[in-house]
Image: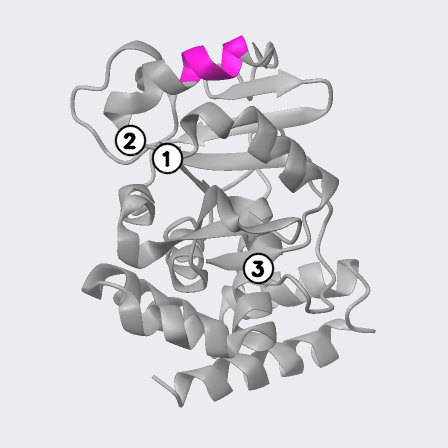
């Protein structure tokens, strides 16, 4: 059980998801924040909570979200998979299913998503106020990297720009919590391990787009003074972790 001092977002998410916490796994930016808990790291603030849910559970989860006063987003680029309450956004993701029906039919799918629901790829999170009470299931650091790697190159719906945060988040995990990544890598299945190795290889390639995208995000966040220095730091972190694999 991982114990954290929750951010307001994480505390609100736990309250909203209390009735379905065993049916969903937190991934995305919120899960990265949990993985980096206690470690100084520059990341973009978020009010989005991304959840992996099994296709068969989607209708029940949606009913519970709406019972907690979350309403379906009316924005075109969020319609069908996003529920909102004030400035909180809950977004659902599922694995591949050839005959998705009901609410699950409109959810985005990720071929790696369902792996987050297995015990080797998720961990319970408790809050310091009650360290024995699991509040949420969150994807492990290795699983997060695998999910990010499977999404490398995706673009934003609004302007078709590549989402550079995916690459930078992998760098943050490899650089800031390498022991946690390595521990969860050891407990992961072959599919996740393969994607972790691939993500590491991509960020260790000086001439590849992944290191450039990660560095651009790094400079944007003020973590490095320029692109060259950012790329150098990313290469060092990726190559150091690669030597452990």
Residue 69 vs 171, above or below: the answer is above
Using the numbered discs, state the Cα–Cα distance from disc 1 to disc 2 in whole angstroms: 11 Å
Sooner in the amino-acid sequence: mark 1 or mark 2: 1
Q: Which residue lies furthest to the left in this view?
A: 98
Secondary element type, mark 1: loop
Using the numbered discs, state the Cα–Cα distance from disc 1 to disc 3 in whole angstroms: 25 Å
Q: Nearer the viewer, residue 93 or 8?
A: 8
Question: What residue is shown with label 2?
Answer: 54
Q: Which of marks 3 and 2 is in front?
A: 2
For the point 45% across and 35% down, the residue is 51
Q: Is residue 109 left or right of residue 210?
A: left
Secondary element type, mark 2: loop
Tell me the crowding category of disc 2: few under 14, some 14 to 19, or many 20 or more residues within 10 angstroms, Cα based: many
Question: What residue is shown with label 1?
Answer: 22
Q: Nearer the viewer, residue 237 or 15?
A: 15
Secondary element type, mark 3: helix
**Labels 1 and 2 touching (C-beta < 8 A):** no
Q: Nearer the viewer, mark 1 or mark 3?
A: 1
Tell me the crowding category of disc 3: few under 14, some 14 to 19, or many 20 or more residues within 10 angstroms, Cα based: many
Give the residues drawn in magenta, as a range.
62-67
Q: Evaluate whether residue 162 shows in this view.
A: no
Image position, residue 96 (x, y; %): 24, 34
Question: What residue is shown with label 3?
Answer: 169
Sooner in the amino-acid sequence: mark 1 or mark 3: 1
């Amino acid at each position: 059980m991982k114990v954290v001092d929750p951010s307001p977002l994480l505390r609100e998410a736990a309250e909203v998801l209390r009735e379905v916490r065993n049916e969903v796994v937190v991934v995305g930016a919120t899960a990265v924040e949990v993985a980096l808990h206690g470690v100084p790291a520059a990341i973009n603030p978020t009010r989005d909570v991304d959840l992996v849910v099994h296709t068969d559970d989607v209708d029940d989860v949606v009913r519970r979200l709406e019972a907690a006063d979350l309403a379906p987003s009316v924005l075109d680029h969020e319609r069908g998979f996003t529920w909102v309450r004030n400035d909180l956004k809950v977004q659902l993701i599922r694995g591949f299913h050839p005959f998705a029906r009901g609410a699950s039919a409109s959810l985005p799918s990720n071929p790696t998503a369902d792996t987050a629901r297995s015990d080797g790829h998720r961990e319970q999170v408790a809050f310091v106020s009650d360290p024995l009470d699991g509040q949420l299931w969150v994807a492990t650091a290795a699983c997060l990297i695998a999910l990010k790697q499977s999404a490398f190159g995706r673009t934003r719906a609004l302007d078709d720009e590549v989402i550079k945060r995916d690459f930078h988040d992998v760098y943050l995990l490899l650089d800031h919590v390498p022991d946690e990544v390595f521990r969860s890598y050891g407990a992961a299945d072959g599919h996740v391990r393969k994607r972790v190795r691939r993500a590491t290889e991509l960020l260790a390639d000086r001439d590849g787009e992944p290191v450039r995208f990660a560095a651009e995000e790094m400079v944007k966040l003020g973590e490095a003074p320029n692109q060259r220095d950012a790329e150098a730091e990313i290469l060092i972190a990726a190559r150091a972790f690669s030597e452990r694999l």
